[in-house]
């Protein structure tokens, strides 16, 4: 399975227009916080690597960490890029593995590690700064089985991030 995944990524990279790295944060949680942080500012950040094919299909992998609430997630993305007015809109599907750790949610014990699989959706709006750099504004909706398990509530969490991207053009 690992060989098939690596071969697929290599094949996509060969046909890629460009690859890019991005790093971002949730401005709301960084500035005013939210109810899970008791309205105190906390860092919630996201790191990504993505490849864009000649057919405008974009695939990637990412990591998000929100240490204050003992939460991180690893995810994949697949989306299609729509370009207009010098900007790019990319709706995505995001298979996700959520990890909860320590005593999240006032857990049963201190070392309460749990992992949950789910599929979310997201949208990136990319605004280029120049040929190599750009800004992305991300909005995502993620069903949260961790919240359902701990509190019994079905919940879809909507989040936003501002990201700085760095592009590497491969076929110029």
Image (cartoon, helix red, strand yellow):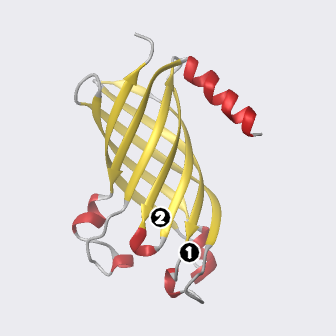
The picture places residue 40, in percent across and down from the top left corner, at 26, 77
In this rendering, the answer to whether 43 lies above or below 134 is below
Label 1 or label 2, whichever comes before in sequence order: 1
**Number of numbered markers:** 2
Q: Residue at x 32, y 64 (%)?
A: 43
Q: Residues within 10 Å of mark 1 (few under 14, many from 20)?
A: some
The picture places residue 15, in percent across and down from the top left corner, at 56, 17
User: In the rendered image, which quarter is residue 90 located in?
Assistant: top left
Kindly check if marks 1 and 2 are in contact, taking CB atoms under 8 A apart as contact.
yes
The residues tagged by marks 1 and 2 sit, at their Cα atoms, a distance apart of 10 Å
Quarter of the image where the N terminus is located:
top right
Q: Residue at x 34, y 24 (%)?
A: 84
Q: Secondary structure at mark 2?
A: strand
In this rendering, the answer to whether 11 lies above or below 106 is above
Foreground of the two, 70 or 95:
70
User: In the rendered image, which quarter is residue 6 located in?
Assistant: top right
- Label ID, residue 21: none
User: In the rendered image, which quarter is residue 168 located in?
Assistant: top left
Q: Which residue is mark 1?
A: 147
Q: Residue at x 74, y 33 (%)?
A: 4
Q: Residue at x 53, y 35 (%)?
A: 79
- Label ID, residue 157: 2
The picture places residue 146, in percent across and down from the top left corner, at 59, 72
Q: Secondary structure at mark 1?
A: helix
Quarter of the image where the C terminus is located:
top left
Foreground of the two, 10 or 162:
10
In this rendering, the answer to whether 93 lies above or below 169 is below
Q: Residues within 10 Å of mark 2 (few under 14, many from 20)?
A: few
| In the displayed structure image, the side of residue 146 where residue 166 appears, left or right | left
| Residue that extends furthest to the right in the rendered view of this protein | 1
């Amino acid at each position: 399975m690992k060989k098939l995944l690596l071969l697929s990524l290599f094949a996509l990279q060969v046909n890629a227009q460009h690859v890019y790295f991005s790093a971002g944060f949730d401005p709301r949680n960084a500035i005013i916080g939210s109810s899970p942080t008791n309205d105190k500012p906390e860092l919630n950040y996201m790191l990504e690597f993505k490849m864009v094919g000649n057919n405008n299909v974009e695939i990637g992998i990412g990591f998000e960490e929100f240490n204050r609430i003992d939460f991180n997630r690893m995810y994949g993305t697949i989306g299609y890029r729509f370009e207009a007015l010098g900007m790019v809109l990319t709706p995505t599907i995001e298979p996700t593995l959520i990890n909860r750790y320590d005593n999240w949610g006032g857990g049963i014990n201190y070392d309460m590690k749990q992992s949950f699989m789910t599929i979310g959706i997201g949208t990136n709006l990319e605004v280029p700064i120049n040929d190599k750099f750009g800004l992305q504004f991300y909005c995502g909706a993620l069903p949260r089985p961790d919240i359902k398990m701990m509190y019994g509530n079905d919940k879809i969490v909507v989040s936003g991030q501002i990201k700085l991207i760095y592009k590497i053009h491969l076929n110029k």
